[in-house]
Image: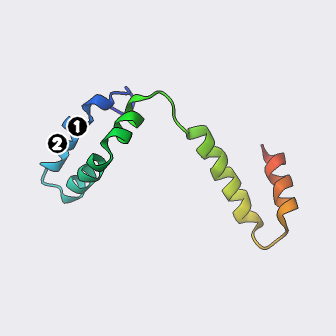
Amino acid sequence: MLTQLQGHHLPEWIEAATTADLPSLQRFGRHLARDLDAVTAGLSQPWNSGVVEGHVNRIKMLKRQMFGRAGFELLRKRVLLSS
């Protein structure tokens, strides 16, 4: 379902998960069902935000490394030079 972009199978999977004998899986299935449209779209569409999330993760790492050392200008230069 994840790699083949088959989000239309999600309601069947949620039904199977909520009837399983695993409480954690039941809870996970119920939480997915709360926002079914968004989760189905995420499993069906070819687009994702992976590249953006990678850049955000890189900037956060630089920010953690620079904490307490210098001001915004040095952080800005490191972010621009690391890309």
As helix, strand or loop, the secondary structure at mark 2 comes to helix
> In the figure, is residue 3 to the left or right of 29?
right
State the colouring used for the structure image: rainbow
Residue 24 picture location, percent across and down = 24, 58
Disc 1: which residue: 11
Going by the numbered disc 1, the residue's amino acid type is Pro
Going by the numbered disc 2, the residue's amino acid type is Glu
> In the figure, is residue 4 to the left or right of 61?
left
Q: Nearer the viewer, residue 37 or 15?
A: 37
What is the crowding at mark 1: few (fewer than 14 residues within 10 Å), some, or many (at least 20)? some
> In the figure, is residue 5 to the left or right of 51?
left
Relative height, residue 28 to residue 16 (above, below): below
Question: Residue at left 84%, top 47%?
Answer: 81
Disc 2: which residue: 15
Question: Residue at left 77%, top 65%?
Answer: 66
Q: Nearer the viewer, residue 72 or 65?
A: 72
Question: CB under 8 Å between callouts 1 and 2?
Answer: yes
What is the crowding at mark 2: few (fewer than 14 residues within 10 Å), some, or many (at least 20)? some
Q: Quadrant of residue 12?
A: top left
**Dividing the image into 4 quarters, which one contains the C terminus?**
top right
Question: Residue at left 82%, top 47%?
Answer: 80
Relative height, residue 56 to residue 43 (above, below): below
> In the figure, is residue 50 to the left or right of 63?
left
Residue 4 picture location, percent across and down = 37, 26
CA distance for labels 1 and 2: 6 Å
Q: Residue furthest bottom?
A: 68
Residue 60 picture location, percent across and down = 67, 57
